[in-house]
Amino acid sequence: MSERAQIENDLELFQAEWDDPSPYMTVQTSGSTGTPKQMRVLKERMRASARLTCQFLGLKKGDTALLCMPLRYIAGKMVVVRALEWGLKLLVREPSGHPLAEPFDGDLDFAAMIPLQVYNSLQVPAERERLTRIRHLIIGGGAIDRELEAALRPLPNRIYSTYGMTETLSHVAMRRLNGPEASEYYEPFPSVQLSLSPDQTLVIDAPLVCDGPLVTNDVVDLQPDGHFRVIGRKDNIINSGGVKIQIETVEAKLRPFLTAPFAITALPDPKFGEAIVLLTTAEATAFPPEALDRYERPKQILRVEAIPMTGSGKIDRAACRRLAIETNECQTSKSKR
């Protein structure tokens, strides 16, 4: 089946499930920190989530929305639900790394993409020009690094990073990436209340889209006005000799110096409990020692063929750990021969 036929088939299957009398729909998590799982969610809550996004962005009936994400994940499903609920016209493109390769007439009013799709579009002049003709662009499904954010800053359209997860039926907060309203802090939707758990992770109370408060694994800086900045994930903390190191913080410090794909992970260590490891696809890797604090410096650098990613474009942290163990064991075995 061709990619085009596949997306049309997926749309038909979605419409059939949406029109089914059952109040529930099945969605799949991305699996960025473990095995993907399926969830049953209320369609009415999906409708509520769609309304929150459209209201926040000021979209109107008859506006055009681009669907360029897989329908097996919540992000793609919610693009369709927003179109159905808000009366948007849907322009469908094959989910790919270059969703703007094919021309379209006029301007688009709304699109949702992952960071990789946006990055790729910026590298091709014709696609970059089309990107600027999307009035409201939201980016989710993965972290937006500083270089990508800087590249988006001068663009004339309204570009947002979203915060959310499958459990919140896409996003519950956004932050502007460009223009005078640009900020590193996310603004929650009006009906969303936020607080901190004892572990300093974000607690979301969004009654329109989920049952009761949801305790996340995201370590955040929460301001009195409800705006917040994400520091990293609680389960992405490496405990090395009693020192807790946030993986995302180390990756952010290394990003200006490493051009090849890379990821920070850990290996079991008899002395420290866990040892920091840098996985990279590069043949050789170098960065200034002062770029990292002493405890953040990798104990090993392991070259791999590819950095494991999930279907939604996030680094697959669990797979990275497994790959580090396998690669290290292979190298150790070779050195003993």
Image (cartoon, grey):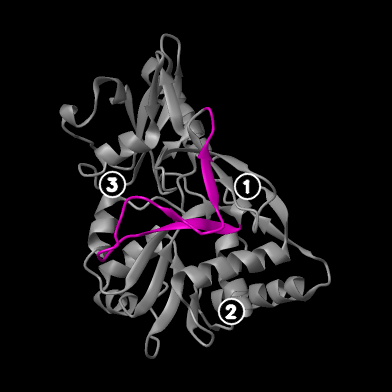
Residue 79 appears in which quarter of the rendering?
bottom right
**Residue 300: % across, % down:** 33, 24
In the picture of the structure, the residue carrying the numbered disc 3 is 260
Circle 1 packing at 10 Å, graded few (<14), some (14-19), many (20+), is few
Tell me the distance, in whole angstroms, between the alpha carbons under discs 3 and 1.
27 Å
Task: State the SS at label 3.
Answer: loop
State the residue in front, 143 or 337: 143
- Let me know if residue 53 appears in the view: yes
**Residue at 42% in and 65% down:** 138
In the picture of the structure, the residue carrying the numbered disc 1 is 36
Tell whether position 104 is magenta.
no
Tell me the distance, in whole angstroms, between the alpha carbons under discs 1 and 2.
30 Å
Q: Looking at numbered disc 3 in the image, what kind of residue is underneath it?
A: Ala
- Left or right: 277 in relation to 199: left
Circle 2 packing at 10 Å, graded few (<14), some (14-19), many (20+), is some
Residue 102 appears in which quarter of the rendering?
bottom left
Classify the position of the N terminus by image quarter: bottom right
**Residue 294: % across, % down:** 25, 20
Q: Is residue 242 above or below residue 106?
A: above
State the residue in front, 131 or 202: 202
> Magenta region: which residues?
169-198
Q: Is residue 28 above or below residue 267?
A: below
Q: Is residue 170 above or below residue 287?
A: below
Select label 1 or label 2 by which is in front: 2
Task: State the SS at label 2.
Answer: helix
**Residue 69: % across, % down:** 52, 67
Circle 3 packing at 10 Å, graded few (<14), some (14-19), many (20+), is few
